[in-house]
Amino acid sequence: MRSWCSNPPRCLPRGAASVPVAAAVGVVLLVAAGMAYRAAASAWDKNPDRNIRLPVPLTEIPEQIGPWVGKDLAIEAATKEYMKRHFADDYVSRRYICAAERLLADAYIVYCATRPSGILGHKPRVCYPGNGWIWDSTVESEFIAQSGRKFECLIHCFHKPVPAYQQAYVLNFYILNGRVTLSEQEFSSIFDRRPNLSGDPARYVAQVQISAVTEHAARALASQITDIILRFLPDQDGRIAVAPAGAEPNDLTGAPEPKR
């Protein structure tokens, strides 16, 4: 008597013969999707006007925040071109002065969403030495914002040698999709390096640098301005607190919101 297993085709589980076909179809679909993505990414990169805009630009950050009064700093054409090549979608560079305490600090904020990882390598320990500064130290620290929230940061110290001696403290941190981080490794993956083809403003990396001749001044401005910066950027749920033009305005003065 012939056993059931003497006829191999009849011993295969139902559907087993279709597994190689399904695998082949899957590979074809993956290859096609990859080719379509590369084509779309290439077209995106070749578009000189590519840009993902925030609902309210960073230049709308108030010039007066508490006792601090700010004025925009000019950005050199070469720097603007560098930022464009590295996918900076929005930025602001502003000097704030607190006359009451005789403090001065510069705030520099860059938002990258077109290609979130475009900001990789644009950090104080690279940029400052590239402009003649000598690195002295970098320490992890934290500060408390006006809201009472505690934020981590890196504080870098640099100097220029005599006869043009200067000293600079740079408080630096990143905001990744609404969350503060200190590490570039968190947005250096292959996914982060891909262009943001969906145009989603909530997929981004922003960098905050606050520099001053004293660490105290850098910390003081960071305490005043950080809550406001975060209101201009999408939070972890993709929501933005600042209202666009024509909508109900938000309180951006730095004053506490009224109790309800």
Image (tube, rainbow, N blue to C red):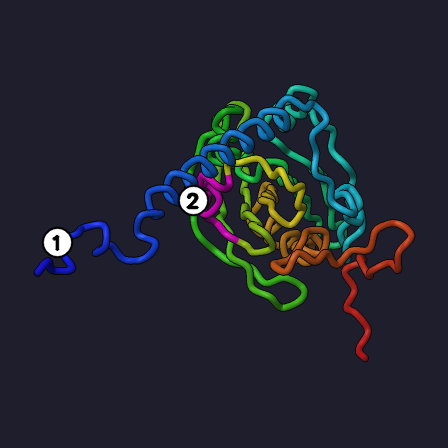
**Residue 18 in the image: x percent, y percent?**
35, 47
Residue 6, label in figure: 1
Residue found at the very far right of the displayed protein: 246
Q: Amino acid at mark 2?
A: Gln
The CA span between labels 1 and 2 is 58 Å
Q: Is residue 184 left or right of residue 17?
A: right
> Disc 1 on helix, strand or loop?
helix
> Which residue occupies 77% across, 54% down?
65
> Which quadrant would residue 75 be assigned to in this image?
top right
Q: Is residue 152 above or below residue 126?
A: below
Q: Is residue 243 left or right of residue 214?
A: right
The residue where tag 2 is placed is: 185
The nearer-to-camera label among 1 and 2 is 1
Q: Which residues are magenta?
A: 181-192
Q: Is residue 11 left or right of residue 22?
A: left
Residue found at the very far left of the displayed protein: 1
Q: Which image quadrant: the C terminus?
A: bottom right
**Residue 257 in the image: x percent, y percent?**
79, 69
- Graded by Cα atoms within 10 Å as few (under 14), some (14 to 19) or many (20 or more), the crowding at tag 2 reads few
Q: Earlier in the sequence, mark 1 or mark 2?
A: 1
- Graded by Cα atoms within 10 Å as few (under 14), some (14 to 19) or many (20 or more), the crowding at tag 1 reads few
* Residue 189 among those drawn in magenta: yes
Q: Please name whichever residue, 67 or 249, is drawn nearer the observer in this view of the structure.
A: 249
